[in-house]
Image: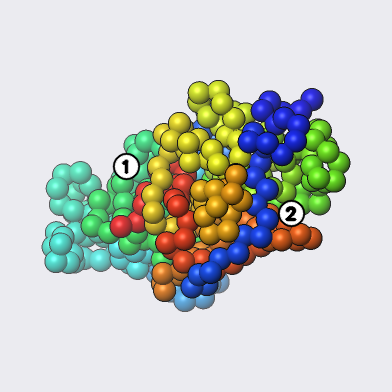
Amino acid sequence: MKPTGLVTGAVASAPVLSIGLIFALMQQPAGSEPASAVCAAAVSAAVDGNTAVEGYSAEQLKNAAAIINAGERLDLPARGQMISVMVALGESGLRVLDHGDGPGPDSRGLFQQRDNGAWGSYEDRMDPAVSATNFIRALQRVDGWELLEPTLAANRVQRNADPYHYEKFWPASVKIVEAISDEDISLEGSGCGVIGSAGVGDDLPWKDAPTWRQVGVNDASTSPLGLYNRECVDFALWRVNQQLGSTSAPFRLHNSTFRPDGKNLGSALTWKDGWNAKGWPTGSTPRAGAIVWYAPGTGGADPTFGHVAVVKEVRDDGTFIEEGYNGNPAPNNHTYYTRTVNNAAPNAFLYLPAQEEKK
């Protein structure tokens, strides 16, 4: 049975068929379980004289283990443990500091916790296990922290001036936790949502499935997401599901269930309306993992349906790397592509839950 709203013919309810997208440029979801329920479970860690992670001392690894084990005692998913280590990296370099800084002269310890009554005594703040426990409890009180980008989740607790301060420490945190945990874990493929994570290339599970042009409009031409196989919207919704930790059927987000008003997410033309109906944010700044939305006829997009793609990487020169499907002329129109795009080219960027526009 054909998914609701996918009618015969290339009409408005069908996914966009944007061919020849050529740029003259500078080159918790409804019906789903909480993200914490699908993330890799809490892990424990132990370090000794033989434990080594390139670039980090024995003292730093011992402190990282104390943080990880505090998380394990509080049943914090592995991604939360990584966020905790990331914050300690960003605040103290994983060292128990007995001094503060200009904004916080009374800050102390791994997490540079203030002497304001919220973080316990001086001894508590200087104790790796106790200070980590207090940080983790505060993180767990942040509503929806599991769906936030790691740096934004951290900022909800730390309240530092730059919410993206911790972003650069995330890769190192993942590396350390994966290296010293007692379990053989990997964040990649763990089922744990990572909003803002970059794609890994042409990983659409049904990238060889027949298109509607090959077999006609029937069940064989629609993907598990309820969209025509290998259209731009099909790949974009796959990336959104991936970032929410949903990588196999039944997917969290589907063409027919995305919008709370019962309408289909539909073609690229209606995606911005779909985002608005769901109450998800939009903006004009590219963010890794955000959906790139082109109105019909913009930048070479299809004049009827427009086009959607995904921000793969944001560059410092005012451009970003876009990835998607169906952005090239035949015979490569239903295949994966990447291209460099000027920030001003798309009409909007559609962000995932709690993904804020970077100012």
Q: Secondary structure at mark 1?
A: helix
In the picture, the quarter occupied by the N terminus is: top right
Instruction: List the single residue furthest toward the top.
Output: 262
Residue 61 falls in which quadrant of the image? bottom left
Q: Where in the figure is residue 215, as x and y percent of width and height?
A: 86, 41
Q: Residues within 10 Å of mark 1 (few under 14, many from 20)?
A: some
Query: 219 or 239, which lies in front?
Result: 219
Could you tell me which residue is drawn at 18 percent across and 53 percent down? Answer: 114
Identity of the amino acid at label 1?
A: Ala
Query: 174 or 329, which lies in front?
Result: 329
- How far apart, in angstroms, are the residues tagged by discs 2 and 1? 46 Å
Q: Secondary structure at mark 2?
A: loop
Report if residue 262 is visible in the image.
yes
In the picture, the quarter occupied by the C terminus is: bottom left
Could you tell me which residue is drawn at 60 percent across and 44 percent down? Answer: 305
Q: Is residue 28 above or below residue 153?
A: above
Q: Where in the figure is residue 160, as x and y percent of width and height?
A: 25, 55
Q: Which residue is mark 1?
A: 138
Report if residue 200 is visible in the image.
no
Left or right side of 138 for 307: right
Total count of labels: 2
Q: Which mark is residue 334?
A: 2
Identity of the amino acid at label 2?
A: His
Left or right side of 159 for 58: right
Residue 358 falls in which quadrant of the image? bottom left
Q: Is residue 147 above or below residue 102?
A: above
Q: Where in the figure is residue 60, as x and y percent of width and height?
A: 40, 68
Could you tell me which residue is drawn at 61 percent across and 51 percent down? Answer: 302
Sequence-wise first label, 2 or 1: 1
Q: Is residue 102 above or below residue 80?
A: below
Query: 118 or 162, which lies in front?
Result: 162
